[in-house]
Structure formats: structure tokens, C-alpha cells
Image (cartoon, grey):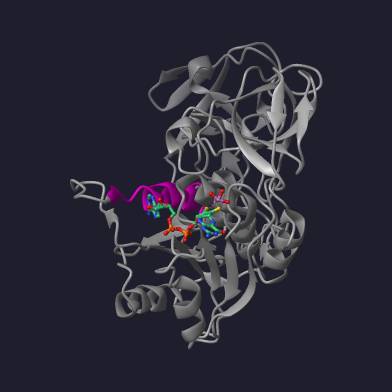
Amino acid sequence: MLSVAEALRAVLDHAAPLPPRRVGLSEALGCALAESVTADRDLPPFDKALLDGFAVRSADLAGPVPFELEVIEEITAGRVPTRSLGPGQCSAIMTGAPMPDGADAVVMVEDSDRRGARVLLSPRKPVSPDAGRLTRGREMRQGEGLLSPGARLDPVKLGLLASVGHADPLVAPRPVVTIASTGDELVPPDQVPGPGQIRNSNATVLEGLVRASSGLPDVAPIAPDVPEALRAVLSRGLANDVLLVTGGVSAGKLDLVPGTLAELGMTAVFHKIRLKPGKPLLFGIGPPRADGRPGTLVFGLPGNPVSGVVGFLLFVAPALKALRGLGAEPPEAIPARLSKPFSHRGDRPTYYPARLLDRGEPGGPAVEPLDWAGSADLRTVATADGFASFEAGDRDYEPGTPVPFLPLPRPD
Ligand SMILES: Nc1nc2c(c(=O)[nH]1)N[C@H]1C(S)=C(S)[C@@H](COP(=O)(O)OP(=O)(O)OC[C@H]3O[C@@H](n4cnc5c(N)ncnc54)[C@H](O)[C@@H]3O)O[C@H]1N2
Ligand code: MOO
């Protein structure tokens, strides 16, 4: 059986960034840019007023205040000035409007007293050239490099793209992730389970985790333990970038998932990891897709709800990040220390639901392992902040012992 680190390496070896694609700006938030972007023009494209007021020749404003000038034009944003300023002249101007020829500064309207075609200006301090104006190209010059491949598109960078007319950036797209739940015992959350049945909670958990990883979830209908139904749902997933199947991967009589995936052309990379919870996790690569995209990353997550969560955090989340061109790295664990004694028994490294008690302590936050009933107990995990990890082997831990902590995503 592989260790967690070996299994993660195998997953990341197969998780190359998705082929880049052009998307609209509203779809590109959080994506990695896959091209260089340059300025299509000078910005601002003209010397522009930064104040509502009067565009002046600063040389006219020497000596005692007030300065009386002739107002020759009114220039609003979006209009183009038609007259140049001569000595003793000014133009009324609004913020964002192009400065008229001859003007080199703006005096704010609050410092003025308009008298019909004339104005008295009483600036509070000497008016130097450039006061109240932004010169052409001050923000960027045409052809100047703005963003490089790999830049993560946050709201401000998207605004920058908008301002240079780059409305369909080439990005590593969000992976489409099919979530397939299997098992005769499952009914949807809005139904009352019959004898022997339970509600499908895994699909909801996984859908949220996919969204928290910026993937696009495609939730398939529950597949009963019938080969044809399972085949239909798994085929649907093999058309997408990632397929998460929950349930049916261990040794039970109706654990049909690995065989059906193999029939559909998936190549298994590993099945079973030294890990608790989540031992029977299956990982494989689907057949090449019709449009030339690489084969689907297939994760057969164990049906037990907490096994699916841990499998997602340890393997699926890093894979989604790698597909999005954001680096192939292990999930980030927080160094923490135990708040109380803890006994670990077992031959598999264990991820144990735990709560963070404080966050700012030297040596890392204190973590409290919870009273947990094992991989079927999702309720306890709902009160956890994440998972404290313990090595394989029987050991009694003292309070204060350092333990890595794997956080659950907390959407804002
Ligand atoms: N003989 C063995 N038995 C088991 C082994 C083993 O190695 N040998 N491994 C155990 C471990 S560890 C796990 S974890 C489970 C995983 O089993 P499967 O992936 O085959 O999952 P199922 O048997 O289908 O379901 C397990 C459990 O989870 C419930 N479940 C399934 N799907 C959902 C869902 N969508 N929402 C909520 N709950 C779900 C299901 O009803 C079962 O209770 O196998 C052990 N057995
Ligand atoms: O490894 Mo299983 O996931 O303990 O329940």
C-alpha cells in the first residue's frame, strides 16, 4: 500500500494544467493567466483633469489672489476640448475630461467664484504645473507589459484587463468535476429513507468542497448498484476533467466501481493507501477524450462520509489546484500543538477531527481532538475546524506535542 506522500506524488504527476482557453472576464476570477498582456494604448489616453474646476495655465496664476480669468469653454468627461487657452483664459472642466491645449493645471471649483463669462480663482496654495491633472501615459504606456503568464486573476487584475480591452483572457480554466454517488441504499436529501436506506450526504459535501476549490461541480444522479446504471453515470464523468465517485470502492459484494471504471477504459494508478480514514481510495486516469484533452482524473472515494472529506482534502484539492495551473503542491498543513493528552492506536496514519482553540499562540494554535466515532461520523466533523494528523503506530501523546493540522475550507 502506498503512503499518503507517495499517493499524492502519483496524483500530481498526472495533474498537468488544463489546456488554456479564452473565457469572459466574469468567468476568469481566480484563474491563472496563460498569456502575457500588454497595454493596448497609453493610459490615461490624454492629459486628464483630476478635479472638477477650471483648467488653467499655471503661469497665469502668479501674484496676489484672486486671479480673474476669462472662461472660454466647458469641458465635460467624454467630450473633447475645441479651444486652446491663451493668456488670461481658462476652461471649466470636469473630472476625467481631457485638458485643453495650453492648460497645465486645474484649480478646484471650491476655490472659485464664477461671474458669468469670467471667474475669480483663489487657490489655497500656489498652483504648480501638473496640479490637478494626470499626464497622458502616466498609468501605462502603449505596449508596456502588464501581466505575465501564471498571474492569478483577482478582481483588480481583472479590472486592469478590462481597462486595456483584454475582454477574453487566455486562462487555465476551472476544472469540471462530476460527482457520482453510488449505492442502492441512497436516497436524495429531500426524501424519507425506507428500511435499510440513508440519505446521500456525500454529494452535497463534495459539491461544496469542489466549489471551495474553484472547480465547477456536475452532480450526477445517484447510481444504484446495477452495472448499466453505474456505467451510464461513470461515462458521463469520464467526459469531464475530474470524476469523483463515492462508495463502492472497497471489498463488498456490490463494490462495482473499480471493475466498471476499468471496463470504461480507466487505467488504475493506485487502489488503497496507508491512511485512516480513506484506505480504499482509488485513483486512475480515464481514456483520452474525444476532443484531445487529457484523460479524466478519476478518484474513487470511499463511501464513508469522512473518508471522502479526508480523501478530498489530501488528494483532490491539490489536484484541482494543479489543473488550474496554480502549482503542484501538497495541501497546506498548519503546525499546531495538542491541547490535551491523546492516545492513537492503529497501523495507519490517522486524520482525526479536531477543533482549533486559539490561533495566535507561539508554536502554533492549540488543537483539541474531538470525541469521534470514526469514518461514518460526519456530525462530529461538522463541529471541527479540520483534522489533526497522527503517525501510524500506538502512541500516547502529551499536551503540547506538535501535530500538523489540515484545515477544512471555510467559505466567507
Ligand atoms: N472487507 C473489507 N471491508 C471494508 C474495507 C476493507 O478494506 N475490507 N474497508 C472499509 C473502509 S476503511 C471503508 S472507508 C469502507 C468504504 O467502502 P466503499 O467505498 O465500498 O463504500 P460503501 O461500502 O459503498 O459505503 C460505505 C459506507 O458509506 C455509506 N455511504 C456510501 N455512499 C454514501 C453517500 N453518498 N452519502 C452518505 N453515506 C454514504 C454507506 O452507506 C456505507 O455505510 O469500506 C469498509 N469495508
Ligand atoms: O479507511 Mo475507512 O475510510 O476508515 O472508513
Magenta range is 198-214
Give the dominant element type of the magenta stretch: helix, strand or loop. Answer: helix
Instruction: Work out whether residue 275 or residue 243 is closer to the camera in this orientation and state it.
Output: 275
Could you say which quadrant of the image residue 19 lies in? Answer: bottom right
For residue 365, side relative to residue 184 (left or right): right
| The magenta stretch spans residue 119 | no
Note whether residue 125 is visible: yes
- Please report the residue visible at 48 percent of the width from the left and 88 percent of the height from the top: 290
Residue 153 visible (yes or no): no
* Count of residue discs: 0
Residue 51 coordinates in the image, percent (x, y): 53, 29
Q: Quarter of the image holding residue 47?
A: top right
Q: Where is residue 296? Give x, y as percent.
A: 54, 75
Q: Does the magenta stretch include residue 207?
A: yes
Classify 117 as above or below 134.
above
Q: In which quarter of the image is residue 74?
A: top left
- Nearest the viewer among 122 and 11 is 11
267 relative to 58, above or below = below
User: Seen in the image, is 313 located left or right of residue 209?
Assistant: right
Where 68 sits versus 392, above or below? above
> Where residue 293 sits: x, y (%)?
55, 81
Q: Residue 80, image x and y in percent? A: 47, 50
Q: Which quarter shows the N terminus?
A: bottom right
Who's the residue at 50% across and 42% down the image? Answer: 97
